[in-house]
């Protein structure tokens, strides 16, 4: 991240290496503690169908957390298996199958539909409502084997980052605050945070380079190299949370991210 920051004349703003960064992290106590991975017994695993283009495979999964009052809430996380973009994070105290369908329908209007959606065997995903939506839109549902989340490795990795960098780092007073902060994190994840698996590019940069612009699904009405996969997909206009320094008008949420949240389907609609 520090290597990506440059001065006005194009020179690097910071002279860093991994030793300096590690020393500063240790001195400031910034390193996040991670649970040690359990040792798994070696066993045969089903081969994953690796995507080769944007909007070929989407992946869905749930995470859960609590508000400051102790009230539980859930998030429905959707990502593109090839560009690694966080397509949407739905937040509410209850997310039944109809809410899953509504989130998919909203993404259909803004991005198109994928060829395959990979999910686990949760009751929301095996429901009749989700099955009917997939059938009517020509989308195939691919279910991983029960008890083998390793077959859903991409979304499990995303969920881990989401929990470490957002859920565990914030104290949500209300559900509305949780939605605003989580949306700001999602925009930052797509437009500011580089990924080693993408050649140290952000998902938005990678999607733009390989032609994964908004509406690139098989039902997309058009394609254009002047559009990006998210409203903040342009690398020249990075998000302001939490890694860059251009905050929005309220000091917490970037203005563009707030506009995206306002366009998203509300919980009361």
Image: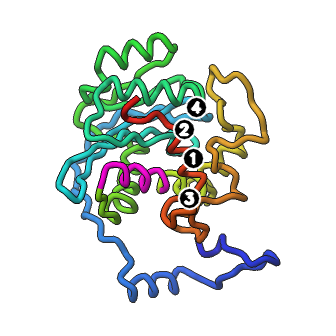
How far across and how far down the image is residue 64, in percent?
26, 47
Q: Earlier in the sequence, mark 2 or mark 4?
A: 4
How far across and how far down the image is residue 267, in percent?
37, 35
Mark 2, Cα crowd under 10 Å, few <14 / some 14-19 / many 20+, is: few
Q: Are marks 1 and 2 in contact (CB under 8 Å)?
A: yes
Q: Disc 2 on helix, strand or loop? A: helix
Judging depth in this view, the residue of 98 and 139 nearest the camera is: 98
Closer to viewer: mark 4 or mark 3? 3
Q: So how many labels did they put on this image?
A: 4
For label 1, the residue is 259
Is the magenta region chiefly helix, strand or loop?
helix
Q: Residue at x 39, y 40 (%)?
A: 90
Q: Earlier in the sequence, mark 2 or mark 3?
A: 3
For label 3, the residue is 254
Q: Quadrant of the C terminus?
A: top left
Mark 4, Cα crowd under 10 Å, few <14 / some 14-19 / many 20+, is: many
Q: Earlier in the sequence, mark 4 or mark 3?
A: 4
Q: Is residue 179 magenta?
A: yes
For label 2, the residue is 263
For label 4, the residue is 55
């Amino acid at each position: 991240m520090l290597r990506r920051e440059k001065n006005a004349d194009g020179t690097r703003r910071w002279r860093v290496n991994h030793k300096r960064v590690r020393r500063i992290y240790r001195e400031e106590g910034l390193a996040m503690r991670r649970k040690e991975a359990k040792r798994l017994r070696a066993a045969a695993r089903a081969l994953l169908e690796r995507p080769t283009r944007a909007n070929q495979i989407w992946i869905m999964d749930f995470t859960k957390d609590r508000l400051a009052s102790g009230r539980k809430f859930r998030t429905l996380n959707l990502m593109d298996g090839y560009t690694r973009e966080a397509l949407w994070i739905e937040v509410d105290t209850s997310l039944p199958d109809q809410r899953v369908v509504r989130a998919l329908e909203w993404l259909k209007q803004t991005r198109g539909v994928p060829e395959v959606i990979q999910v686990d065997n949760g009751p929301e995903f095996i429901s009749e409502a989700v099955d009917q939506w997939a059938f009517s839109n020509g989308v195939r549902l691919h279910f991983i084997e029960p008890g083998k989340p390793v077959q859903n490795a991409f979304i499990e990795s995303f969920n881990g980052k989401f929990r470490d960098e957002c859920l565990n780092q914030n104290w949500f007073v209300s559900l509305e605050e949780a939605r605003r902060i989580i949306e700001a994190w999602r925009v930052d994840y797509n437009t500011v945070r580089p990924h080693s698996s993408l050649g140290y590019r952000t998902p938005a940069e990678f999607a733009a380079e390989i032609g994964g612009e908004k509406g690139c699904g098989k039902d997309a009405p058009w394609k254009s190299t002047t559009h990006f996969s998210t409203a903040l997909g342009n690398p020249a206009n990075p998000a302001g949370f939490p890694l860059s320094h251009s905050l929005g008008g309220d000091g917490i949420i970037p203005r563009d991210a707030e506009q995206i949240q306002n366009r998203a389907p509300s919980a009361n609609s």
